[in-house]
Amino acid sequence: MKGIAEKVNSLLKFLIVVCLSLMAIFVFTNVVLRYAFDSGITWSEEVSRFLFVWLIFLGAILAFKDNEHLGVDVVVKKLPLAGKKVVYLISNIILLITLVFLLEGSWKLTLLNTDLSAPATGMSYAYIYVFGVIMSAAMILIILFKLYRFIFKKDYSQLIMAASEDQIEHIGNNETGDKK
């Protein structure tokens, strides 16, 4: 299972690099062509916009997997272990519900926009909205995996989002009854 997760992680990072590189190449080339040769590539801005959207969605998946999104855990840090567990479960259930709505809405927008095409490239706008489906589905899988580890494997390392390694060890030691 870890091998698959690492391969998916590497693939996402590679796709982000490709999107960012292509964006930079397209925009730079277009700028040079406009200033030096008084011409340009009509489709480069549009493709760059598509790539930017894809880059954001792919980056959101990676950030979500690694708990790198912004979060406020001032209250959670002060709670006892049982309170942290309850808050963790409630917050993940709320996230699951929200992501299901996002998945459904993105799917409906993808279907609605299959016939609409971008003016310069002719690409369907569904290519933008389908990444909402991909992102929400990936995040749902990540949450389900984290909840599985939390409930069945008793992995409490995710209770505090911005925890240092000392705090994570302290949480694990409190659960097993060890004292430091």
Image (cartoon, rainbow, N blue to C red):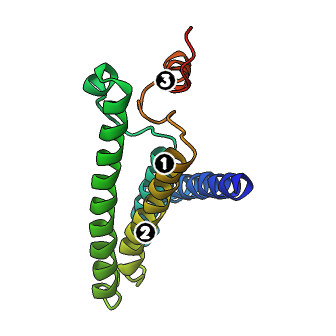
| Quarter of image, res 127 | bottom left
Residue 171, disc: 3
Identify residue for label 1.
151
Q: Nearer the viewer, mark 2 or mark 3?
A: 3
Q: Residue at x 34, y 36 (%)?
A: 70
Local crowd size for mark 1, using a 10 Å CA cut-off: few (<14), some (14–19), many (≥20): few
Q: Which amino acid type is marked by label 2?
A: Phe
Question: Alpha-carbon distance for marks 2 and 3?
Answer: 36 Å
Q: Residue furthest bottom?
A: 115
Q: Nearer the viewer, mark 2 or mark 1?
A: 1
Q: Which amino acid type is marked by label 1?
A: Ile
**Camera-nearest residue between 130 and 29:** 130
Q: Secondary structure at mark 2?
A: helix
Tell me, yes or no, whether the two marked residues, 2 and 3, touch with CB atoms within 8 Å.
no
Local crowd size for mark 3, using a 10 Å CA cut-off: few (<14), some (14–19), many (≥20): many
Q: Position of residue 57 (x, y in %)?
A: 43, 58
Residue 27 seen anywhere in this rendered image of the structure = no
**Camera-nearest residue between 20 and 54:** 54
Q: Position of residue 148 (x, y in %)?
A: 51, 53
Residue 77 horizontal side relative to residue 32, left or right: left
| Quarter of image, res 72 | top left
Q: Residue at x 51, y 18 (%)?
A: 170
| Quarter of image, res 12 | bottom right
